[in-house]
């Protein structure tokens, strides 16, 4: 299965509670932190909801 690296690039201050919880569910706490996930529909949907706060890179 394909993997993606998700990096938090912007703060969650002044964001909705839903967006804050999505970042927490992805495992992102600090700006610059990178986590790796499988590219499942659930994960991709969460990333899409906070795409303005994170950067995404595909890995093999």
Image (cartoon, rainbow, N blue to C red):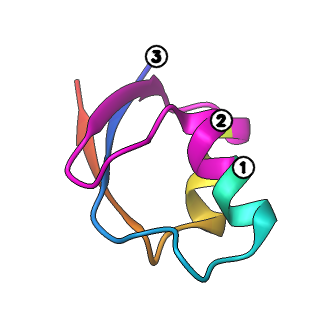
Look at the picture and state if 33 lies above or below 48.
above
Q: Which residue is mark 3?
A: 1
Question: x%, y% of residue 12?
Answer: 51, 68
Residue at 72%, 49% in the rendered image: 21
| Front tag of 1 and 3 | 1
Residue at the top extreme of this rendering: 1
- Asked if the residue at tag 3 contacts the one at tag 1, i.e. Cβ–Cβ closer than 8 Å, the answer is no
Callout 2 crowding tier (Cα within 10 Å): few <14, some 14–19, many ≥20: few
- Is residue 45 at all visible to an observer of this figure? no
Question: x%, y% of residue 8?
Answer: 33, 55
In the foreground, 17 or 49 = 17
Question: x%, y% of residue 57?
Answer: 25, 48
- Asked if the residue at tag 2 contacts the one at tag 1, i.e. Cβ–Cβ closer than 8 Å, the answer is yes
Between discs 3 and 2, the one toward the N terminus: 3
For numbered disc 1, what is the local secondary structure?
helix
Look at the picture and state if 56 lies above or below 33.
below
Residue range corresponding to the magenta coloring: 22-42
Instruction: Measure how far apart labels 1 and 2 are at the Cα level.
Output: 6 Å
Q: Which residue is mark 2?
A: 25
Look at the picture and state if 18 lies above or below 25.
below
Whether 34 is among the magenta residues is: yes
Disc assigned to residue 37? none
Residue at 65%, 58% in the rendered image: 20
Whether 26 is among the magenta residues is: yes
Instruction: Measure how far apart labels 3 and 2 are at the Cα level.
Output: 20 Å
Between discs 1 and 3, the one toward the N terminus: 3
Callout 1 crowding tier (Cα within 10 Å): few <14, some 14–19, many ≥20: some
Q: Which residue is mark 1?
A: 21
In the foreground, 55 or 17 = 17
């Amino acid at each position: 299965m394909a993997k993606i690296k998700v990096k938090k690039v912007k703060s969650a201050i002044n964001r909705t509670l839903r967006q804050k919880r999505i970042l927490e569910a992805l495992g992102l706490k600090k700006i610059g932190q990178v986590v790796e996930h499988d590219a499942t529909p659930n994960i991709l949907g969460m990333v899409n909801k906070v795409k303005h706060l994170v950067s995404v890179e595909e890995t093999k």
